[in-house]
Image: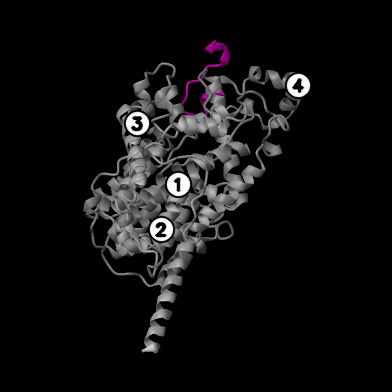
C-alpha cells in the first residue's frame, strides 16, 4: 500500500513539473507601455473571463463590477465610432504621449496612424479628392474557404527524390554560393542580402519558390505541371521592378520565411494531412506575387497623384489589387494546375492572403484575427505532448484562413526579426524608397508623406522611428503569433534584440545622415529645398556636381514611373 501511495506521489510530482516546464516555455508578454488591443478583443477577453470565472458571484462582486464597467465603456466607444471596433482605443493620444519627445515625432505618429483606416489617411483631406475617396479596403476573411476540403492526387514523393529534384534545379543556375538553399523551409533567417547586393542575375525568387514547393511535395500532391510552374514563377520574377526594397529579393525573402514558419508551426503538415494542400500552394504563391509590379511608392502616393491604378480600384489597396490582377491574369495563361478542380478556390485564397499585406489595414487585420483566435477553447492544454499553442484541429476553415493570413503578415514584416546585419540591409533600402517617393512628392507639389522628406533627416533609419514601428506595429503582431505558435519564439527573441539595437542607436548611421554626409541627398531634390544646407556649407553644390549628382530634368523624372511631374516653379 505504501509503495502504491509513493508511486502515485511520484507520478503527480512529475506531471506537475511537466506542466510548470510547459508554462515556463510560453513567451512572456512584452510590456510596451501601450494599450494596442481593440475594443472587440477586450470585450471577448472580458466575456470569456466572466464565463470561466472560478469566483462565486458574492465573493468576486468587486472584480465583476470593474469588468462590467470596462465592457460598458468599450461598447459606448463603438456606438460613437463603429470604425474603431478593430482598432486600438485612442491610438492617436497614446502615440502622442509615448513619442512626443522631439520635433520629428509628428512624422512618426502620423506614419503609425496611417496603418489604420480609423486614424490614418481617411481622416485627412488631400488635394483634389474628397475624404470619402481616401478609404482603404477592408480585408475580408470570407470567401469559399469552407469548400477547400479536397484530396490530393498521387502519393508522397520520397524525401531523397525531392532533394534530388532540388539539386537539379539549383545546378542549372549560378546560385549555389549566394543563398543557403538547403535551409529553405528549415530556417527563419536565410540571408538574401548578399544576393541582393549582387543584383538579380540568378532567378532568386523563382528558385526559392520552386524549392519550397518541392519540399512541401506539392508537385506530386496537386499534380502540378513543373515546367509551367517554373515558367510562371519566372514571369513573376521578371515583373518585379528593380526597386531598392520592393524587389524580387524582398519577395524571395518573404517566401522563404513564410515556408519556414509554415513548417515550424506544423501548419504545412496539417494542411497536407487534412487534404488541403491547395491552401498551402495558395500561401506560397501569395508570398511570391504580393508585391508584383510594385512601383516603389505607397498606395497613398498613387491616390494623391490620381494614377490610373488608384482610379481603377477606387483608392482602395491600390497596389495589392494591381499585383493580384496582373499576377492572376498570367496564372490563367500558364495554368500550372492543369485544370485542377480547386482552381477557383486557389484564386480566392490567394486574394485573401495578398490583401492582408495592405499596411493601411494593419490594425483592423490583426484585430480581426485576435478576435477570432484568442478563445481559450481553441488552445491546446499546457501539458499537451506537442507543446502549448493553437490547436489547428479545432479551427473552422475560415479561422484556418485567418491563421495563414497572419503567417503572411509575419513573414512580410520578417526582416525586422532577422540578424541585425540583414535587418539593417533592408531598412537602408526601405529608406531609399521612402526618400525617393518624398522627392517625387516635392517635385509634384503635393504634401510629403511622413518619414519620406530627406531634408528633415528623419527617415526609417533613424533609431527612434524604428523603436516606434517595433513597439506599435511589429512586436504586438509577433507576440500574438508566438502565443499561438511558441515554436516561432526565436523570431520574437531576435525582434527584441533588434529593438534594443535601435534603442541604443537612436540617431542615424553616418552614411545616411544628411548633415554628416551631404551625398546622401537624392538627385531629385530641387535645389531650393537644399537652401538651408547650402547656407551652412557653400561648397556642397560643388561637391554634388563633381560627383554627378545633378538635378534631374523634367523629362528624366517622368521616365521614372507612372507620374506626370511638375517642377516646384510650375506648381507655384
The residue beneath circle 1 is: 477
The residue beneath circle 2 is: 262
- State which mark lies toward you, 2 or 1: 1
Dot 4 lies on which element? helix
Q: Rounded to the nearest whole Å, what is the CA distance between mark 3 and mark 4?
A: 51 Å
- State which mark lies toward you, 3 or 2: 3
Q: Rounded to the nearest whole Å, what is the CA distance between mark 4 and mark 2?
A: 53 Å
Residue 27 in the image: state x and y as whole percent.
48, 57
Dot 2 lies on which element? helix
Residue range of the region highlighted in magenta in the rendering: 556-572
> Relative to 101, is 349 above or below?
below
> Relative to 118, is 57 above or below?
below
Residue 422 in the image: state x and y as whole percent.
59, 50
Find residue 545 and name its label. none
| Sequence-earlier tag: 3 or 4 | 3
| Sequence-earlier tag: 2 or 1 | 2
Amino acid at each position: 500500500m505504501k509503495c502504491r501511495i509513493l508511486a502515485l506521489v511520484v507520478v503527480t510530482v512529475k506531471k506537475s513539473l511537466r506542466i510548470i516546464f510547459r508554462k515556463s516555455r510560453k513567451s512572456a508578454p512584452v510590456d510596451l507601455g501601450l494599450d494596442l488591443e481593440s475594443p472587440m478583443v477586450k470585450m471577448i477577453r472580458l466575456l470569456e473571463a466572466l464565463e470561466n470565472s472560478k469566483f462565486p458571484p458574492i465573493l468576486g462582486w468587486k472584480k465583476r463590477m470593474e469588468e462590467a464597467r470596462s465592457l460598458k465603456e468599450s461598447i459606448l466607444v463603438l456606438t460613437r465610432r463603429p470604425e474603431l471596433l478593430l482598432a486600438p482605443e485612442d491610438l492617436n493620444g497614446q502615440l502622442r504621449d509615448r513619442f512626443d519627445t522631439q520635433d520629428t515625432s509628428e512624422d512618426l505618429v502620423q506614419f503609425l496612424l496611417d496603418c489604420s483606416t480609423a486614424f490614418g489617411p481617411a481622416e485627412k483631406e488631400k488635394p483634389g479628392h474628397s475624404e470619402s475617396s481616401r478609404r482603404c479596403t477592408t480585408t475580408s476573411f470570407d470567401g469559399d474557404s469552407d469548400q477547400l476540403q479536397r484530396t490530393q492526387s498521387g502519393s508522397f514523393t520520397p524525401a531523397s527524390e525531392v532533394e534530388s529534384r532540388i539539386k537539379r534545379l539549383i545546378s542549372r543556375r549560378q546560385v549555389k554560393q549566394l543563398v543557403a538553399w538547403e535551409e529553405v523551409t528549415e530556417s527563419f533567417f536565410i540571408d538574401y542580402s548578399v544576393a541582393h547586393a549582387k543584383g538579380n542575375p540568378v532567378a532568386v525568387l523563382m528558385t526559392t519558390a520552386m524549392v519550397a514547393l518541392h519540399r512541401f511535395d506539392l508537385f506530386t500532391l496537386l499534380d502540378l505541371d513543373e515546367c509551367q510552374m517554373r515558367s510562371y514563377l519566372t514571369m513573376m520574377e521578371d515583373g518585379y521592378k528593380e526597386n531598392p526594397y520592393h524587389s524580387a529579393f524582398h519577395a524571395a525573402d518573404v517566401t522563404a520565411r513564410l515556408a519556414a514558419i509554415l513548417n515550424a508551426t506544423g501548419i504545412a503538415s496539417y494542411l497536407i494531412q487534412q487534404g488541403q494542400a491547395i491552401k498551402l500552394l495558395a500561401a506560397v504563391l501569395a508570398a511570391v506575387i504580393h508585391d508584383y509590379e510594385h512601383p516603389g511608392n505607397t498606395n497613398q502616393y498613387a491616390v494623391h497623384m490620381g494614377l490610373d491604378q488608384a482610379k481603377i480600384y477606387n483608392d482602395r489597396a491600390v497596389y495589392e489589387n494591381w499585383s493580384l490582377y496582373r499576377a492572376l491574369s498570367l496564372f490563367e495563361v500558364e495554368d500550372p494546375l492543369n485544370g485542377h478542380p480547386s482552381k477557383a478556390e486557389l484564386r480566392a485564397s490567394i486574394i485573401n492572403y495578398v490583401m492582408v499585406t495592405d499596411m493601411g489595414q494593419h490594425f483592423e487585420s490583426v484585430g480581426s484575427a485576435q478576435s477570432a483566435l484568442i478563445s481559450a477553447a481553441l488552445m491546446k492544454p499546457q501539458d499537451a505532448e506537442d507543446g502549448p499553442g493553437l490547436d489547428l484541429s479545432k479551427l473552422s476553415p475560415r479561422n484556418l484562413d485567418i491563421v495563414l493570413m497572419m503567417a503572411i503578415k509575419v513573414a512580410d514584416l520578417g526582416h525586422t526579426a532577422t540578424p541585425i546585419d540583414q535587418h539593417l540591409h533592408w531598412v537602408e533600402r526601405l529608406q531609399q524608397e521612402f526618400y525617393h517617393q518624398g522627392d517625387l512628392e516635392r517635385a509634384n507639389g503635393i504634401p510629403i508623406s511622413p518619414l519620406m522628406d530627406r531634408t528633415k533627416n528623419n527617415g526609417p533609419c533613424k533609431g527612434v522611428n524604428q523603436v516606434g514601428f517595433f513597439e506599435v506595429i511589429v512586436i504586438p503582431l509577433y507576440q500574438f503569433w508566438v502565443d499561438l505558435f511558441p515554436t516561432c519564439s526565436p523570431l520574437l527573441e531576435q525582434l527584441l534584440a533588434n529593438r534594443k539595437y535601435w534603442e541604443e542607436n537612436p540617431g542615424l548611421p553616418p552614411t545616411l545622415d544628411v548633415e554628416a554626409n551631404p551625398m546622401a541627398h537624392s538627385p531629385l531634390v530641387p535645389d531650393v529645398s537644399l537652401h538651408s544646407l547650402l547656407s551652412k556649407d557653400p561648397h556642397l553644390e560643388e561637391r554634388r556636381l563633381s560627383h554627378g549628382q545633378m538635378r534631374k530634368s523634367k523629362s528624366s523624372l517622368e521616365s521614372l514611373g507612372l507620374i506626370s511631374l511638375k517642377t516646384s516653379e510650375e506648381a507655384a
